[in-house]
Amino acid sequence: MSKRLLIFIYGLIAYAIGMGGLVWFILFLGSWDFLPQHINSQAPGHLPTALAINGGLMLLFAIQHSVTARPAFKKQLTKLIPPAAERSTYILLSGAIMAMFCLYWQPVEGELWRVEVQPWNTLLVSGYIAGWAIAVLATFQINHFELFGLQQVYYHVKKTAEPPARFTERLFYKVVRHPLQLGVLIGIWITPLMTITHLLLALGMTLYIFIGLHYEEKDLTAQLGARYTDYQNRVRMILPFPK
């Protein structure tokens, strides 16, 4: 029982770190002045150094989010840690990397656009908030607690089998197959101030999202078969337009 309880506590800590890192990253991108440091708060430095550090952070993010999410990697990982802690470990690492973006993403000189006049400034800020709200709400339309590892450690400490994963096609998921990623794309691109510093991060995240979706779609097709193929034929992946 003590081992199960420790895994449960580990899951709670991992959830707090994962959510804390995500919230910090969202605020970091918003350039909110109440933060001591945000994406546009620092003066540009040495360009090659900035590009090298930013590229390294993006590579670390891509490896952690793609490689560790593959079934083959999970199978090997659960030989070293309890299966109930696998998702929590993923979430903990995700939160830590989000925090690293906020601490170490390097500024680069230049602006693409700056919108200060009303009502356009407010509209863009509202779009940024709406994008992240869509991403968060999408997690609750599938299974937020399973996605962030809490369900696994809860059932483990209760010595109860987890309920089987369910295919969801409701609310946002009736419009696009991946509303979480759509929300992130809206959140990173709709901003009243697009500096080159922000642009590099947005481009890197966008590239990762579409590469990640390629592999996620393959995994879902292999797991769900004809049911998911039919879903693909009826509902667009990202763009919320009728087929």
Image (cartoon, helix red, strand yellow):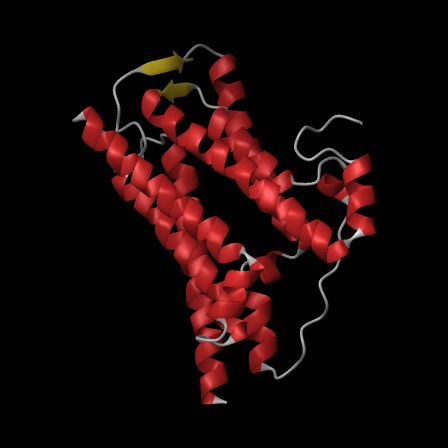
| Relative to 12, residue 49 above or below | above
Residue 58: percent from left, percent from top: 37, 40
Point 79% across, 44% down: residue? 229
In this rendering, position of residue 166 left or right of residue 51: right
Point 46% across, 77% down: residue? 7
Residue 154: percent from left, percent from top: 57, 74
Query: Is residue 196 at all visible to an observer of this figure?
Result: yes
| Relative to 153, residue 19 above or below | above
Q: For the image shown, how many numbered marks are present on the structure?
A: 0
Point 54% across, 59% down: residue? 148
Quadrant of the drawing holding the C terminus: top right
Query: Is residue 37 at all visible to an observer of this figure?
Result: no
Give the farthest residue toward the bottom: 1
In this rendering, position of residue 150 left or right of residue 104: right
**For residue 2, which quarter of the picture?**
bottom left
Residue 210: percent from left, percent from top: 56, 36
Q: Nearer the viewer, residue 233 or 194?
A: 233
Q: Nearer the viewer, residue 21 or 86?
A: 86
Q: Nearer the viewer, residue 108 or 215?
A: 215
Q: Nearer the viewer, residue 28 or 34?
A: 28
